[in-house]
Amino acid sequence: MCGIAGIAGHDIDQPTYRSAIQQMTDALAHRGPDAEGIWNDAHCFLGHRRLSIIDLSAAGNQPLISQDGRYTLVYNGELYNYRELKLELQRAQHGSGQLPYFFKTNTDTEVILAAYLRWGIECLQRFNGMFAFAIWDTQEQRLLVVRDRLGVKPLYYHFKDNVLSFASEIRSLMRSGLTAKKASAASLAEYVQYATVHAPNTILEDVFILMPGTILEYRQGVVTMSEYWNINKHTKTIGDLSYEDTCKSINHLLTASVERRLVADVPFGAFLSGGIDSSAIVGLMSKVSSQKIRTFNVSFDEGEFSEAVYAKQIAEKFNTEHHEIKLTPGDFLKQLPEALAAMDHPGGDGPNSYIVSKATREAGITMALSGLGGDELFAGYDIFKRFHELETKSWLNLIPGLGRSLGGKLLAARKKSVQGDKTAEILRLDQINGFNAYPVNRKLFNQTDYSALLRQKFKDDAFIKNIIQKSTTDKQHKLSRVSLFEIQTYMQNVLLRDADQMSMAVALEVRVPFLDFKLVEFVLSIRDEYKYPHSPKKLLVDSLGDLLPANIVNRPKMGFVLPWKDWLKNELRDFCEENIVQFSKRPFVNREAVLVIWNRFLNNDPRITWSRVWHLIVLNHWMNTHQVEC
């Protein structure tokens, strides 16, 4: 796990670009404290910072140059099946004239390069892992930049005046001097509504994130994109498996995924909230590992937010070395500045990930497994239930204007809840169904508040609607379609981004077994009748057998949240108020509307939850920190 950076262009062997790649690589030092490397020729610079996980020797340092000197590789991530591929590459390929490859290191980095030498870009079809890497071909003067199938590892890029620059983090690009520190007006509007910016866009103008499962090719001043994997193509039922056989297959795939992710030459552990997903990962880790598992849980003085008792129960069941991280408002306040400073792209949930990552790293752990992805695959969120309920209410569309009339009455009644606002807006849609309602369910503000906040008007749901339109399924896989929405919006653009930037800020590698592409493909192919969410993630629970205690399975879902509502109004109020006032003066928002939203929150308006103000505070702080203009 590392940080990578690069610049490619015609005749760039100049002091300006040499300084730029050094600045870019230095900006990634926190991702890779173990080693640094920079390579260049007349047309390409490549930089690398290393966090040693596999083969801790200096032989694993990068950039890695092929034995014939033609190719140079920089790589961030982990290739979980590298040992199997290595064995295959050490053998001659029958009938092809391919000779055995003789490895000089024990790294997965060299396996990637050797696989490319033998199979070309088709090697990607053989890779199982999380990765972002770049290969420069000195002979053809061609750069290939690749991102993993699910987008676990990030890769940002900027292309201007025939020069391509890329990096693992946006701040690395900003340090290069090649990228203007200017926010995109459309992205700012999208962020205000969704607390994120959906790929391929970022908060910055002309800076993009490479889409998952995508290859970027740069050659002679031209950039082209191609897909090697598309998640939307995996929602067709495979065979005619019984429910029992389906559960067996899920158990096998998830167990194999966990086992693959335990390959490391450093101490490892797991995040444990005490919910179904993290408990399942810890249980399977204990099942397949010969080592005692180390687990980490964040607990709070505010009892309603603490899941510590459930985490402790799982830790005892599987005999883990358990670490409970007790957090008070004072502790969090002390760590908040460094958590916000660690943020590469603004987002409201990042500090949560930072706190547990930092504590885990300070306990001597370099790699940890997470239960991220379980809700998206196995219909664990309420949004799946809301979708299913709307699909059964097609009668609202039979009488023209009925839904709009009901929505108008509900809006007029000013129902005092966030869900009331959303229900009113859904009822006012031209066609009421789960697909059209999805963007509404993911919004932060109702249309009235959102419109009042911004000076310039944008179509706030354009990017989500584009994802929805591309994510089509048949009638047997409607819940899989919701999974596609969740994976390509909230998961990839919030959860995975926060997990990466906050864990790597403290040089901790996080692995996500639920996002093994083989498991993802299989679960997406399962028809709705096996997945209907009449109880929390029943399909996953049944697939685990008797692995988890009944009270863990049946307890109310809490999610990994901090007691923000209380903190923002008390211990963090001065910090929040200062940033809100500054934010209200920014040219893209209406000052009075911002201050009204803040006052409604302070006065306990149930429609203005903490998340509706906190992400604005984070955005303002991030723009100040990085001196970003708008």
Image: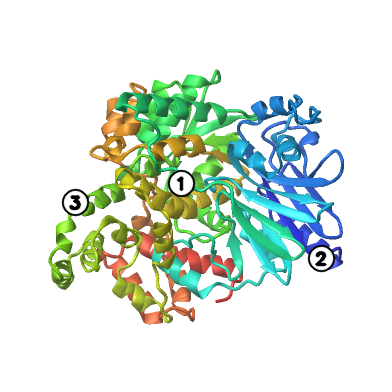
Considering only vertical position in the picture, is 318 above or below 77? above
Type of amino acid under label 1: Lys
- Residue shown at 63% from the left, 41% from the top: 124
Quickly name the residue at label 3: 392
Mark 2 or 1, which is nearer the eye? 1
Quickly name the residue at label 2: 10
Which residue lies most toward the front here? 95
Describe the colour scheme in one phrase. Answer: rainbow
Mark 3 or 1, which is nearer the eye? 1
Q: Position of residue 144 (x, y in %)?
A: 70, 52
- Residue shown at 71% from the left, 59% from the top: 218
Mark 2, residues whose alpha carbon is within 10 Å: few (<14), some, or many (≥20)?
some
Separation of residues labelled 3 and 1 (CA atoms) = 26 Å
Q: Position of residue 373 (x, y in %)?
A: 44, 42
Separation of residues labelled 2 and 1 (CA atoms) = 38 Å
Considering only vertical position in the picture, is 595 above or below 44? below
Separation of residues labelled 3 and 2 (CA atoms) = 58 Å
Q: Position of residue 170 (x, y in %)?
A: 62, 60
Q: Earlier in the sequence, mark 2 or mark 1?
A: 2
- Residue shown at 71% from the left, 61% from the top: 165
